[in-house]
Image (cartoon, helix red, strand yellow):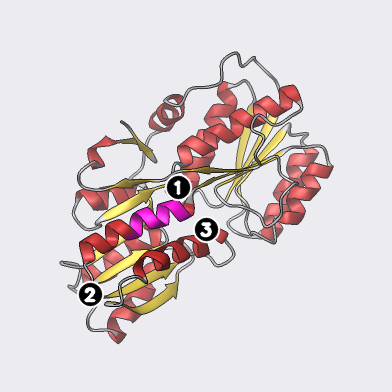
């Protein structure tokens, strides 16, 4: 797995300007992500932490790993520790509503990143990738490479995360326009590389002809690539990912992955902390709109050299 140094992560954060006039402030900002073993969530936590410390706060990063009970305990700890704000990547669109409400009722503003909850008016802000735009961007690029006729596989993320359905729906909106594209399998692999690998192995056994794979994230796609490679079927198979993770970018460089859709996690993780800082100091949101979308970008062999830091595409 490709790893970036702390210096590179700090450089990614520093490349995005802070609001002018931010004053030194004391207090804790509690950052809760899903699982830092995944480079996407690792970057999310580290960029948020670096930004909070740059603004003068103490910052801690913890992970719930998709478990709402763990998430609840982490929110309780943030409340007990007197956090000034909580940056949360929610574990479940429905199941995390209660913990966000609990923190808000305790007087701690909550800023959601990466994933939404199915209720508005509780969190101060929900900052997420524009998943519908990113999915359409990826699907158009994928179809141009695959053509009008192919047998393909789709990997679906965690059903408890609204992003999984949004991306899948975005793919289907584009690809359903081409009746010659036959989806021979759709598998839930929960954003996980190992599950992508094992599910792809089973799909290969059941389907001797597979022309392409479109995946809801990079980890599932990378697992599928390993399975295809082991079966001697990777050459000529178009594989598309979603996230813009360092490993996926290396796979694009190597010609194993056709493209990946970059989620600007380094941008909105930083922006969430900047908005939290503004709210702490002014008692009102910096941005009036609660749900804020950040557009995705496409990484292909043509622009892969512009990937200069984790989840950062330079101009």
| Residue 176 vs residue 99, the one in the foreground | 176
Where residue 61 sits in the image (x, y, percent)? 59, 40
Q: Is residue 282 above or below residue 75?
A: above
| Residue 76 vs residue 293, the one in the foreground | 293
Quadrant where the C terminus sits is top left
Distance between the alpha carbons at the discs numbered 2 and 3: 27 Å
Judge the density around disc 1: few (<14), some (14-19), many (≥20) Cα neighbours within 10 Å. Answer: many
Q: Is residue 129 left or right of residue 73?
A: left
Q: Check residue 40 in the rendering and tell me which mark sits there, or answer none.
A: 1
Residue bearing the label numbered 3 = 163
Total marks shown come to 3
Image quadrant in which you'd find residue 281? top right
Identify the residue at image location x=20%, y=44%: 302
Q: Residue furthest front?
A: 177
As for residue 136 lying within the magenta part, the answer is yes
Distance between the alpha carbons at the discs numbered 1 and 2: 33 Å
Identify the residue at image location x=39%, y=41%: 311
Residue bearing the label numbered 2 = 149
Where residue 113 sits in the image (x, y, percent)? 58, 44
Judge the density around disc 2: few (<14), some (14-19), many (≥20) Cα neighbours within 10 Å. Answer: few
Q: Mark 2–mark 3 contact, CB under 8 Å?
A: no
Pick whichever of labels 1 and 3 is earlier in the sequence: 1
Judging from the image, what secondary structure is the residue with disc 2 in? loop
Pick whichever of labels 1 and 2 is earlier in the sequence: 1
Judging from the image, what secondary structure is the residue with disc 3 in? helix
Judge the density around disc 3: few (<14), some (14-19), many (≥20) Cα neighbours within 10 Å. Answer: many
As for residue 160 lying within the magenta part, the answer is no
Q: Is residue 100 left or right of residue 5?
A: right
């Amino acid at each position: 797995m490709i790893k970036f140094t702390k210096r590179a992560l700090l450089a990614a954060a520093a490349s995005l300007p802070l609001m002018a006039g931010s004053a030194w402030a004391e207090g804790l900002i509690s950052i809760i992500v899903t699982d830092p073993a995944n480079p996407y969530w690792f970057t999310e936590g580290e960029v948020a932490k670096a930004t909070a410390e740059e603004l003068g706060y103490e910052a801690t990063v913890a992970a719930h790993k998709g478990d709402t009970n763990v998430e609840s305990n982490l929110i309780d700890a943030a409340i007990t520790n007197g956090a000034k704000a909580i940056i949360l990547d929610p574990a479940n669109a429905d199941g995390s509503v209660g913990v966000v409400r609990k923190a808000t009722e305790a007087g701690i503003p909550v800023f959601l990143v990466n994933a939404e909850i199915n209720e508005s008016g509780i969190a101060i802000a929900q900052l997420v990738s524009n998943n519908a735009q990113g999915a359409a961007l990826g699907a158009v690029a994928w179809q141009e490479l695959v053509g009008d006729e192919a047998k393909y596989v789709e990997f679906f993320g965690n059903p408890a995360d609204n992003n999984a359905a949004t991306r899948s729906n975005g793919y289907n909106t584009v690809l359903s326009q081409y009746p010659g594209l036959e989806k021979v399998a759709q598998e839930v692999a929960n954003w996980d590389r190992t599950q992508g690998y094992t599910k792809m192995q089973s799909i290969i056994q059941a389907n001797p002809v597979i022309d392409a794979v479109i995946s809801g994230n990079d980890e599932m796609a990378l697992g599928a690539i390993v399975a295809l490679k082991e079966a001697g079927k990777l050459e000529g198979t178009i594989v598309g990912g979603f996230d813009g993770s360092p490993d996926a970018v290396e796979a694009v460089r190597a010609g194993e992955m056709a493209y990946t859709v970059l989620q600007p996690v380094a941008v909105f993780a930083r922006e969430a902390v900047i908005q939290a800082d503004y709210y702490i100091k002014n008692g009102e949101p910096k941005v009036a709109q609660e749900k804020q979308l950040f557009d995705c970008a496409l990484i292909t062999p043509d622009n892969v050299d512009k990937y200069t830091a984790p989840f950062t595409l330079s101009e």
